[in-house]
Amino acid sequence: MESLLTITWDAGRGLDLGFFTLRYYSLLFAGGFVLGYLIMRRIFEREGIPEAKLDTLLTYVVIATVLGARLGHVFFYQWDYYSQHLAEIPKVWEGGLASHGAAIGIIIAIIIYCRRVLHKPVLWMLDRLVITVALAGCLIRLGNFANSEIYGQMANAQWETVFTNPVRERIMAVYGRYLEGIEFRETDRKEVADSLIHPIYEVELQFAQGVQKDVAQKLVSRRISPYLAGLSKENTNFLIPPQELNWQIDQAGVAVVEGLGIPRRPTQLYEALAYLLIFFILARLYLLAPVRLRHGLLFGLFLILVFGFRFFIEFYKENQVSAEQGDLLNIGQKLSIPLVVLGIFFSLRKLNNPENE
């Protein structure tokens, strides 16, 4: 099946401002808190709650989200590694956040917040907070797309993406002292390999001044080509060349290598759209007075919809850690099941007992 739309995602991880690089992921992550704060302010005004308590809520949620997401990744996904590298656990900026850990952290924080600050039922607060969490989840998945991470499996889908930036980053990290830059240009040709339709790219390797032609030739043929071929353990399944590596290098120190782009499902965008829809559903239900009286109903629906979709979409995503290889269900799916069950419990409990608590 030939795809209708192939996106080449070749953007870097942020905007280079000269003195500082503004990371797309960080910007969208922070945007989730900003929009969440504005929405919760309207909710607090509607409920007649002092805005001072909202500022405290923001502090609780920010700390719980970052801490819970980080510890969730450490313990759920890579404890075998971090148990031997404890000093790296606080390095959040290097990546590694788990949404299931964030969910647990937020629930614990709201329990503490309601007892110490708000003096209202925990489910009352969770019913309102999950509206903003769904929107934040949408922005975070857009950030994952910008970062070329947590992507889908290889497929000839109707909507697919070729992520080229991870290849560039890895090659530049190892051989950056020889290269000034790497550019990817999609051609109008395609090739079928392993039952997949691959768009063909011209990969332009721009060598730095002073690098001799024979040195550049050796680097391309012996060192750099495995990264483009998907043969490197650090960088597999991004770009592979045709059966014969076609390349040339000109006098200006530019080598042009032809490679096949690997089409992937942009599952980050699927999740972002799903969470945006869930946000609108929860927001609409909140505005219905009878629903507001059922403590725990919106919270339960949030768990069912978000983690139910998460369970489903994981079938189309690449495994995040090697420990998941060969398992019927990956770690994300196993963690989603109890949260969906919990959501069903709260939803059915309040549907059968809708009186105000």
Image: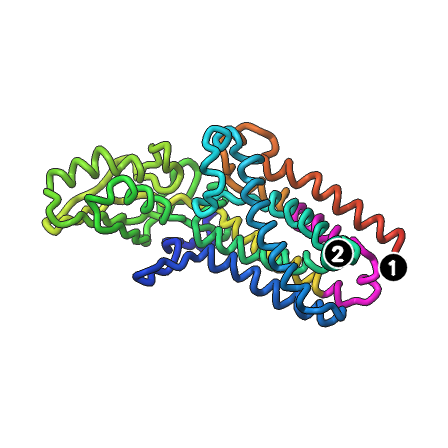
Along the line of sight, the residue nearer the viewer: 154 or 195? 154
- Which residue is rendered at x = 52% and y = 51% of the image? 268
Please give the name of the residue rendered at 20% of the width and 42% of the height, measured from the top-left corner. Answer: 247
Q: Secondary structure at mark 2?
A: helix
Q: Is residue 309 visible?
A: no
Residue interval drawn in magenta: 284-309
Residue 95 lies, in percent from the top left, at 46, 45
Q: Earlier in the sequence, mark 2 or mark 1?
A: 2
Q: Which residue does the numbered mark 2 point to in the structure image?
A: 298
Q: Amino acid at mark 1?
A: Asn
User: Residue at coordinates 79% horizontally, 48% vertically from top-left?
Assistant: 346
Compared to residue 114, the image places residue 234 above or below, namely above
Nearer the observer, 51 or 30 = 51
Q: Which x, y percent locates residue 69?
A: 57, 45
Q: Could you give the CA–CA distance between mark 2 and mark 1, rounded to whole angstroms?
A: 14 Å
> Considering only vertical position in the picture, is 127 above or below 169?
below
- The image shows a total of numbered marks equal to 2
Q: Position of residue 3 (x, y in %)?
A: 46, 51
Q: Residue 327: image x %, image y %?
A: 58, 29
Which quadrant of the view contains residue 44?
A: bottom right
**Label 2 environment density (alpha carbons within 10 Å; few <14, some 14–19, many ≥20):** many
Label 2 sits on what residue type? Leu
Q: Which residue is mark 1?
A: 356
Residue at left offset 57%, top offset 60%: 33
